Image (tube, rainbow, N blue to C red):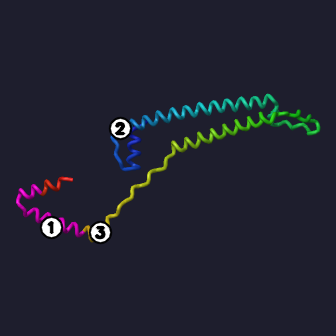
Amino acid sequence: MDQQKLRTLVFEKTGVRIDIDDPIFALVALNEAVLAEAVERHVELLDDATADLADQVQALQESGSLCHFSKAAGERPAPAALVAPPPAIHVQPLREKRIIAIAGGAALLCAFVVLAGQALLLRPAPAPAAAVAANELTPGQSAALREGEKLAAIVARLDPKTRAVIAAEMQKP
């Protein structure tokens, strides 16, 4: 984790300066640790699913359910009349459904892992802060400023004790 690079990135995107000793870096380190653990778990799940899929493919090859291509690239295949028909394959419907269900589950698991990774790693950029344009003052604001200036002039003409009392009252919430 390059703290200087993170500080620069945050400043460029938000305009907020972050100090090296800022506690936010502790959260960044915690986030990295949690992410690494989650990725490790998903990799283990993918490895298990891949091993299961390889076992299933091996079982299909051994049972003769898959085609085996052993011809060299340059050889011509034998005429169809000379090739013996393949032996009849009797796959139980339940086993076939189980294999399809496992393959579908593996595909869904892979899709979930990809979508979860995208959701975790790809965050949209924050919306830029709305710039407030300084327009002219409203009539109410202008009147309030004029009244405040009058009160400031009146208070300045009062004796020091009364000014101190007024200043103390203005400090109260």
Q: Dot 3: within a 10 Å radius of its alpha carbon, few (fewer than 14), some, or many (20 or more) residues?
A: few
Find disc 3 in the rendering and name its residue.
Answer: 136
Q: Quadrant of residue 71?
A: top right
Q: Residue at x 41, y 55 (%)?
A: 128
| Residues drawn in magenta | 142-165
**Going from the N terminus, do you reach mark 2 or mark 3 first?**
2
Q: Dot 1: within a 10 Å radius of its alpha carbon, few (fewer than 14), some, or many (20 or more) residues?
A: few
Residue type pointed to by label 3? Glu
Find disc 1 in the rendering and name its residue.
Answer: 150
Q: Residue at x 66, y 40 (%)?
A: 107
**Going from the N terminus, do you reach mark 3 or mark 1 first?**
3
Seen in the picture, residue 109 relative to 124 is either above or below; the reply is above
Disc 2 and disc 3: Cα gap in Å? 42 Å
**Going from the N terminus, do you reach mark 1 or mark 2 first?**
2
Picture coordinates of residue 79 (x, y %)?
92, 39
Q: Nearer the viewer, mark 3 or mark 1?
A: 1
